[in-house]
């Protein structure tokens, strides 16, 4: 705490470190600490009782939050024919096949989500070393490899988020902005937690959600009272 700013220390003093707050109360507390000029992102972190080394316990996917995340995401699509036309009509920033692949190989990465169809994965298989480390490689697990291009582009541009556990079994995601009404943030937090509960691996026994918290991107965390 000694290395934190005066603002941060003042905000942290509002939080009872021994308490787990109901979501509604936690959201209100986080919103009361938005003293910076920029509209900070509100993030959630969930500690799961999974073994990340076991593939069957890996947590990865995507979820469309009911109130969005306050950001229009830049989406590109690997498609041809009618699907390419649909992707363009839905507002994809770039659509293509080999030409788009070569553009990315040349260093262009001005996008947040890459969507592909199963039949077009052959075109981008060689981009794994470029897109993989940045979490941008299309995958069926997070809904970015699909034949339903129209729905995928619409949902991801509206703020559908991707998530995956880290090496310690934590899952983190953005759930909105500080400027969101409290009810909207609560709706997103509740939806994310319910989704994480719904993807619980069958081999995980006992308490699944060990801890959860929300925080503004420049503020202290507030622990949530969540049933495991």
Image: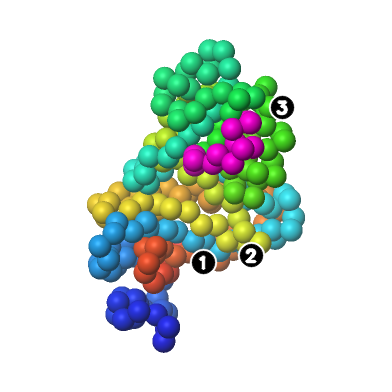
In the drawing, does residue 64 fall left or right of residue 134?
left
**Are the residues at dot 1 and dot 2 in contact (C-beta closer than 8 Å)?**
no
Please give the residue where the numbered disc 1 appears in the rendered image: 211
- Foreground disc of the pair 1, 2: 2
Residue 84 pos. (x, y %): 52, 18
Badge 1 marks a residue whose secondary structure is strand
Residue 119 pos. (x, y %): 67, 22
Please give the residue where the numbered disc 2 appears in the rendered image: 168
Q: Is residue 109 magenta?
A: yes
Label whose residue precedes the other's in the sequence (1 or 3)? 3
The residue that appears at 62% across and 59% down in the rendered structure is 166
Q: Which residues are magenta?
A: 101-112
Q: Residues within 10 Å of mark 3 (few under 14, many from 20)?
A: few
The residue that appears at 59% across and 47% down in the rendered structure is 135
- Foreground disc of the pair 3, 2: 3
Please give the residue where the numbered disc 3 appears in the rendered image: 122
Q: CA distance from mark 1 to mark 3?
A: 40 Å
* Quadrant in the picture for residue 13: bottom left
Residue 56 pos. (x, y %): 72, 49
């Amino acid at each position: 705490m000694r290395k934190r700013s005066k603002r941060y220390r003042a905000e942290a003093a509002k939080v009872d470190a021994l308490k787990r707050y109901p979501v509604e109360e936690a959201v209100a507390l986080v919103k009361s600490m938005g003293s910076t000029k920029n509209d900070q992102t509100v993030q959630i972190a969930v500690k799961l009782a999974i073994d990340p080394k076991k593939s069957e316990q890996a947590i990865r996917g995507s979820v469309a939050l009911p109130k969005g995340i306050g950001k229009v995401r830049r989406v590109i699509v690997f498609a041809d024919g009618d699907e390419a036309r649909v992707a363009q009509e839905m507002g994809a920033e770039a659509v293509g096949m080999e030409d788009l692949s070569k553009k990315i190989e040349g260093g262009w990465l001005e996008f947040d989500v890459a969507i592909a169809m199963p039949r077009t994965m052959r075109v981008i298989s060689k981009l794994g070393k470029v897109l993989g480390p940045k979490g941008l490689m299309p995958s069926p697990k997070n809904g970015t490899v699909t034949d339903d291009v129209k729905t995928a582009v619409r949902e991801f541009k509206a703020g559908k988020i991707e998530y995956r556990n880290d090496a310690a079994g934590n899952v983190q995601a953005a759930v909105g902005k500080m400027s969101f009404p409290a009810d909207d943030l609560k709706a997103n937090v509740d939806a994310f937690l319910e989704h994480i509960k719904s993807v619980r691996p069958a081999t995980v026994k006992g308490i699944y959600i060990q801890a959860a918290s929300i925080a503004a991107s420049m503020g202290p965390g507030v622990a949530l009272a969540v049933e495991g």
